[in-house]
Image (cartoon, helix red, strand yellow):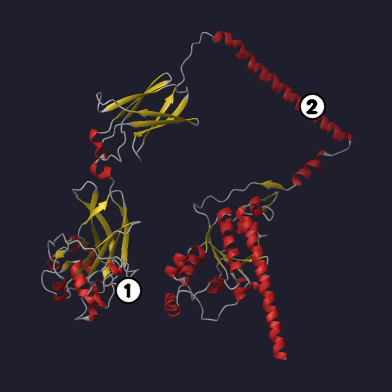
Amino acid sequence: MWRAVLALYPLLTLSRPLWAQDDVSAVTINPQDCSLDCVRQGGPGCEYCRIKSSEVKQMLGYTSIKPLGSCVPWPCFELLGDKDPEICQHYVQAPTDVKVEFVPEPNPTSDTIVVSWKPSYYGIAFLRGFQVSVQALGGSRIACQLFLFHRNLSLSASHAQMVYKSDPFPSLSLGSQYAVTVMAVPAPEQWESFYRSMYFSTRSCAEKNGLQQCKKDWYPEHVEVHQEGTNATVTFNLAPPKLGITSYYSLCYANGMKKYTDITPISTSNNTHHSYQLNDLEEGTNYTCEIAANIVDAVRKAFNIHVTRIQKDNSALPAALPLALILPLCVAVVVILVVLLSVLTKRRSQLQMKKFNIKPAIIKEHQESVTQEESVSLNRSKLTPPRLLICYSTNDGPAHVKAVMQLGAFIQQHMATQVCLDLWDSLSVAEEGHMAWHCRQIRESDFILVVCSQGVNHRPESSELDCDDQDLEADRELNSGPNSFSSEAAVRLIGEEVGRAKARGHDLSKYMTAIFEYSDATDIPTELRLVSHYTLTSDLPLLFSHLHGVALHRPGGYLKINHISEEGFAKLPAGAALQWAIHEAGIAMRSTRHHSAKSALNGAVERLA
């Protein structure tokens, strides 16, 4: 599908033709102002031409290009290939080193850019031109430019060091984000891999015009504070009169309290600075304050005020000396009493044990033998949580799929793990294809969990799957459609990965299997019985231990995590949802098995009759 509209700006001229360049590595190529007929005929003076939208409309026979959408890769055969079809049969790799340069723009409310790039080495001999587009992120506005070489020009590999430039893209809003895309021509209809994109932001008003020219971005740059007891005088610079800012405000925070001050300078006084008072501040308190123009979404200037304590008269100090002597004495007496009480209590316990013939060594041995609960910290060497891919079967109905989704949600929320599930990433699955998506996740994930059920073993027979076989994936996508690679095929692919890892003597700890309480151990495929197996939800602590590499038991202690224990996980909202989903899936599975058994029995009776 084509995705964008051509909007063309023929402005700059080519300073030197391509064949006249001596030092290829230092050349910048600007577009020429020439016609499409000149490009098609291969005439002189049209080596690198900007093509106007009117010429494209006339050549393609369209009176309006709006029905085509936005900037689309225009068909090379229609523009250049009528006399020599082979000129458009070879595709060229995406350009490299895409850059954005700001150029002078007299309008203070917008920016103008020029895009530059280098062609790719691969297929450069078949390069016919470039298409450049700029689109506002989150908006529908888009501008496009098309540049073509004449039909008789064939570039050598050394031209990959040339820098090609676009015409200016004017009237870009300040402080906005845009995406620029450069595509090599000719491009196939499926052109996603034949372009290079980058994101950039236009300058803010303050960056382009200066802070004193921008009302929305202006804020007081200079703030001075002078304290006088519990009062403070704040002086700041005023906005230029041409901005039309006539009032300001200040807001200070401390100990949960807010102090708001409305500021309106007198126009007849100083026009560059103004001072205002903050009264009745608390001693020994740090205030965080902000000052800004009294307009919507004004930029605030932050500053701090530390109110120091006022030194008081020390004439009353001799009267307070007796109290200063009494307090340490009282503390010493209390400490002595506590020590004596402790000694008496211990002595009394020893006398009682001696009276009843109790040996202290036996009590100490018993206390040491009791298992202690212990707090264990997770490994903080990894900056990111472990990545877990969950695979499952869709043959067991929507209730089973819902249980898998609730399991993934619980693991991600309460087991410090990043979960990858195809149902959560449907857009990437649609773009990459099911097999390519699963192969990428298998490579990038730290762990892979296969949720086994009765439907996992209902798999069609097919040739061996291999993530390294890119041609096989392409053939499957073209011949069978995007839905041909099912979740069962992903389970089979993982089984084959386990088999290959076992044959090569690799570590199998990356792979795990699990069953819900309504499934049986016989539902686990033979090739996956070599890896660790868990029954959920009773084995959630063991699964946590596997994912984070922490031991649940060690001499003299054990690790207990309340929110993933068999008793405690259902107290959480996500745990309760998982428990209910497993319950509903179990009812649905038992109903399906009963219906299947009844149908099989009726079929057998009919055959006997």
Q: Quadrant of the N terminus?
A: bottom left
**Quadrant of residue 121 within the rendered picture:** bottom left
- Residue 484 to residue 257: above or below: below
Q: Nearer the viewer, residue 373 or 133?
A: 133
Q: Nearer the viewer, residue 64 or 211?
A: 64
Question: In this figure, what is the number of numbered marks?
Answer: 2
SS for callout 1? loop
Residue at image mark 2: 344
Q: Which mark is residue 568?
A: none
The Cα atoms of the two marked residues, 1 and 2, are separated by 93 Å
Q: Residue 120, can we see it? A: no
- Residue 169 to residue 204: above or below: below
Residue at image mark 1: 189
For image coordinates 72% across by 87% down, the residue present is: 605
Give neighbour class at mark 1: few <14, some 14-19, many 20+ (Cα, 10 Å).
few
Of the numbered discs 1 and 2, the one sitting upstream in the chain is 1
- Residue 545 to residue 528: above or below: above
CB of mark 1 within 8 Å of CB of mark 2? no
Q: Amino acid at mark 1?
A: Glu
Give neighbour class at mark 2: few <14, some 14-19, many 20+ (Cα, 10 Å).
few
Question: Is 45 left, or right, of 184 in this rendering?
Answer: left
Residue 552 locus on image (x, y percent) = 66, 54
Q: Viewer-nearest of labels 1 and 2?
A: 1
SS for callout 2? helix
For image coordinates 29% across by 69% down, the residue present is: 67
Residue found at the very far left of the displayed protein: 44
Residue 419 locus on image (x, y percent) = 53, 60
Q: Amino acid at mark 2?
A: Leu
- Residue 88 to residue 372: above or below: below
